[in-house]
Amino acid sequence: DIICLQEVDASIHNSLISPVLKAKGYQGFYSNKVTSQQEGCSLFWSTSVFEVAKAEDMQEFPLRSLLTKDASLDEGEYYNAKSTVRELVKLERWESMNGIRQLLEDHDEVRRVYSESVGQILQVVRLCPKQPASSEQGCSSKPDSIVVANTHLFYHPMAGHIRLL
């Protein structure tokens, strides 16, 4: 009922994957990596199982922006990101990010490689399961909503210092 794809070519998504899945009753969206490559992630869900999602329920975040100290970066840097800088600033409350930010501040080479080479994107969607018309004892066993995330993390055999982030 939920399909998460990584390393999806943008043209294949637009010309093949999305039209076929839409015809089969799926809704979804594509998020390009924050690099010059035309590849990214696709996330789809069945509209027979879940309500049609609103645009505000579908978000994408460039992972490297979650680790920058300066959240006032130009939104153009995020390509087609549906998130805003204001939304990214809200993520500052994640205390676990402080150690990673400190590592990037302390090590110029790690910071350079991370900021220039890493273009991962995080897709997040809030889905509302369709509730049965009538349920026993007047309560539904399904949650009001669920959150689904999709990402493709950077991998290179000689880049353990980046994977640790």
Image (tube, rainbow, N blue to C red):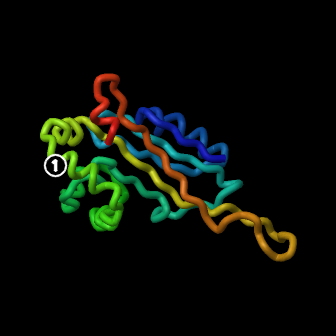
Q: Nearer the viewer, residue 45 or 100?
A: 100
Residue at 46 percent of width and 32 percent of height? 12
Q: Position of residue 74 (x, y in %)?
A: 19, 57
Q: Is residue 34 above or below residue 147?
A: above
Q: Is residue 159 above or below residue 146?
A: above
Quadrant in the picture for the C terminus = top left
Residue at 34 percent of width and 23 percent of height? 157
Residue 10 figure quarter = top left
Residue 89 figure quarter = bottom left
Disc 1 crowd rating (10 Å Cα; few below 14, some 14-19, many 20+) is some
The reply, left or right, for residue 59 in relation to residue 69 is right
Q: Position of residue 119 (x, y in %)?
A: 30, 40
Q: Residue furthest right?
A: 136
Residue at 54 percent of width and 53 percent of height? 148
Q: Nearer the viewer, residue 122 or 23?
A: 122
Q: Position of residue 94 (x, y in %)?
A: 35, 61
Q: Residue furthest top?
A: 157
- In the rendered structure, which amino acid carries the disc numbered 1? Glu
Q: Is residue 140 above or below residue 4?
A: below
Query: Element at badge 1?
Result: helix
The reply, left or right, for residue 65 in relation to residue 23 is left
Q: Residue furthest bottom?
A: 138
Residue at 40 percent of width and 46 percent of height? 31
Q: How many marks?
A: 1
Q: Position of residue 93 (x, y in %)?
A: 33, 66
Residue hosting label 1? 105
